[in-house]
Amino acid sequence: MTGADVLEISDLTVDIDGPNGTVRALDQVSLSVAAGEVFGLVGESGGGKSMLARSIVRQLPGRARVSGSVQVDGRDVFAMDAEALRQHRGAGAALCFQTPRSSLSPARTVGHQIVDRLRAHAGMDETEAWKAALALFQQVGIREPERRLGAFPHEMSGGQCQRVMIALALACGPRLLLADEPSTGLDVTLTRDILALIAAQAGKDRGVIVISHDLAAIAAICDRIGVLETGRLVEIGPTAQLLTRPTHPYTKRLVAAVPDINRVRAATGAPAGGGGPLLAVENADVVYRSRFGRQGHQALFDVSLSLRKGETLGIVGESGCGKSTLSRTIMGLIRPTRGRVMIDGIDLAGLGRSRLRHLRNRMQMVFQDPIDALNPRRSVAQIVADPLRLIRLGRAEQDRRIDAILTDVGLGPDYRKRRPHELSGGQAQRVGIARALVIDPALVVLDEPTSALDVTIQAQILELIRRLTARRDRGYLFVSHDLAIVRSICDRVMVLSEGRVVEEGPTDRLFEAPQDPYTRRLLAAVPSLSTVSERHAGNGG
Amino acid sequence: MRLTRYIVRRLLLLIPVLIGVSVLTFVLIRVLPGDPVLLIVPETATEADIQQARERFGLDRPLAAQYLAYLGDVLRGDLGRSITTNTPVAEQLTRRVPLTLELIVYAMGLALVIAVVGGIYAARRAGRPSDHTARVAALAGNSLPEFWLGLVLVLIFYQALGWAPPPAGRISPLFSVPPITGFITVDTLLQGDLPASFSALHHLMLPVLTLAIVITAPLLRSVRASALEVIDSDSYRCAESHGLKDRVLLFAYLFRLTLIRLPTLAALVFGNLLGGSVLVEYVFSWQGLGQWALRGLLLRDYPVIQAYVLVVATFYVLVFLIADLLQAALDPRVEV
């Protein structure tokens, strides 16, 4: 049940002075969060979500100018002196940083980091603090907590680091727990567990704010949700109401853009499986050898798949399941330890460097991080022209092809001279797709092409991919951890777990009647707005 | 266990390094113009006398034979005799290496303390006047020629103020210190002679200060840059946003992470110092390794130059080994 307000923000405006003038990062934001409440803050990158979190702990860039007020527990955060501010940071409001692995201090054991916080806020002595740290580790569900206290962040997995980060924030004993994008980089099952853990921290004396770009993921745990668009809080309300009856156009767009696993792929023109065999992977094992002859790590076990022209095959699984290894093996970047990869019936293993290079015009890849995958010093036209070097073309023909493909991916020739830093994430991914398609490859591997993008942009890129795959003129391999997206795009789906294929079949069959228990678990973990809003409505919203 | 294996492996690396540099120096100094024999024979010497002197030093034989003979001697621990002074090279080395090492170890220590304290101080006040002052001061020190700086310090602290001893020797002539380790500050302490110890430190004051001022700037800049990077990192910001006490933040979250990047640069600076101290040795009549080697080089004293190069190469390998071990100790992500 909700109690007294722990956070009260009124008319908060933050201006950041930069070289190109002043940017209004937050514009007259007002909201309150009560004890026992889980409040969700959604919006896309640049919307001001993180700035709002930073304002609450008064950790803003030096050039920020602030007006309005932030009160935690009735005390004005911007009126505090240094010592009061130190106590407020942590004990008043504690922030779980985004990307916990890089936000934990790298050269200090996680146990020491917890103890530091316990000693700063709970006034414990060394022995008490270590006992309390152990209890906290158990509370946040860290396996082998005693051993883990002595570990360094780089020795832990992403999910474990997120749990440590939550434990760090809890160690401060905050009245308000802030979690900034707690599910970034985690797969579906882990995301669900972590969000449930965060939601469970709301209590008699504690309110929780969860910040995310992923409306679907956090809707399940939030009592109320606020929507930020370019610094303004455009809509705020109970979760069910916001999902079923959004009033602001931006909220409507956000809700509509969420991929829904219950939405079935629209019927496409040409029948699947019409073309000849294009790609075949036969009984591939991949073992990564470690240096000094120690036991290697086997990433793929006896994986087989085939793909015909015109078909789109989805490869899904949690992080670490071998998805990336498989796509790299198919691209010929990794040689399988056993088994073979055949393109057009040609075994990649039998090819020398130069033959392999020439086969590359038959296969291209689109990468996960669109900006990182583009050389920052080259223009869009130069980037897109890169694969064309494999087949010598005349200048005019090359330019014609570049313009045509840029138009095809929805950018147009105007973008030729731009450089990657002048592109948004969505535009950069369109350039990445154009680069893959310009040489007219027979096989395109899309490696998590939308996971680094905001939801509305994601929807646009997916629309583009859907349009491309519907043409049935090449084979697509769509690698993703997002089951809802896979369902809306792929003809067939293959589920990978710990390097093994656990299930494979036509998309609709696999989603409606999964055979393998692992697939069922994966499907059950997917958040879906339609089920969430039903549940909230059932609870009396 | 793994650590021992690692250290042994790194030390084995010394063998190819020493063979490489010794071959290189051996050939290079003989190709250089200038003949040591012409410098030691009297002006009235006939062609036959010169030939006789050549034979005496074995310089008439083919290069390969000379090198093999030299290698054989070195493996037996015989570094040869100086052509110009006829003293055993090994004896000179054991006397002079500690002299210079003592000088540069203190200088390096002082520079590191100034650089770490100043660099972190400057980074925490980045952009404010105190930050600019620290950086400009370090840069100014770096821009001064060390012999000139040494002379100015002598003028001020010896001549004008009388705080420093005269710039000649390592200890007041009133004390006699029989060498044990060759490091005079250590020897005086071992013998429990506190006044002598004080005198030795007193004599070290100005040369150490001169060297330290010159090498502080690059170290300070590096410390400041990495401290700024740490302060700007999510991990530090996270610790700060959780309200840790200032002292804990400074030592546990800033200090150690800042130091991680230092050993490699420090090793480079320290390695350079062994040869680079020669001008300061001249100014303070230190009679160290640098002075001896420079004279050997000018007179084409082959055995001296060869021995000096071996010492410097060994020194570099050891210093970088220590730097890598320090780095691994500071950074848990680095494995040796």
Image: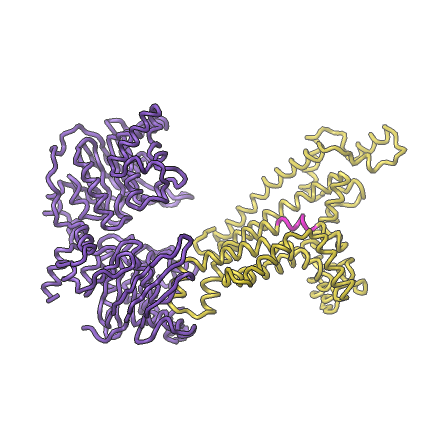
In the rendering, at what x and y percent does residue A396 appear?
Answer: 33, 25
Residue farthest along the front direction in this orientation = A21
* Chief SS of the magenta region: helix
The chain displayed purple equals: A
Question: B161 and B166: which one is in front?
Answer: B161
Residue in the picture at 74% in, 69% down: B195
Where in the figure is residue A477, as x and y percent of width and height?
Answer: 23, 38
Which residue: 12% across, 57% down?
A: A531
Q: Is residue A285 visible?
A: no
Residue at image x 44%, y 56%?
Answer: B332
Which residues, given as a range, are shown in magenta? B271-277
Chain identifier matching the yellow colour in the rendered picture: B
* Foreground residue among B198 and A90: A90
Whether A36 is among the magenta residues is no
- Relative to A193, say whether A277 is above or below: above
* Residue A19: percent from left, percent from top: 42, 53
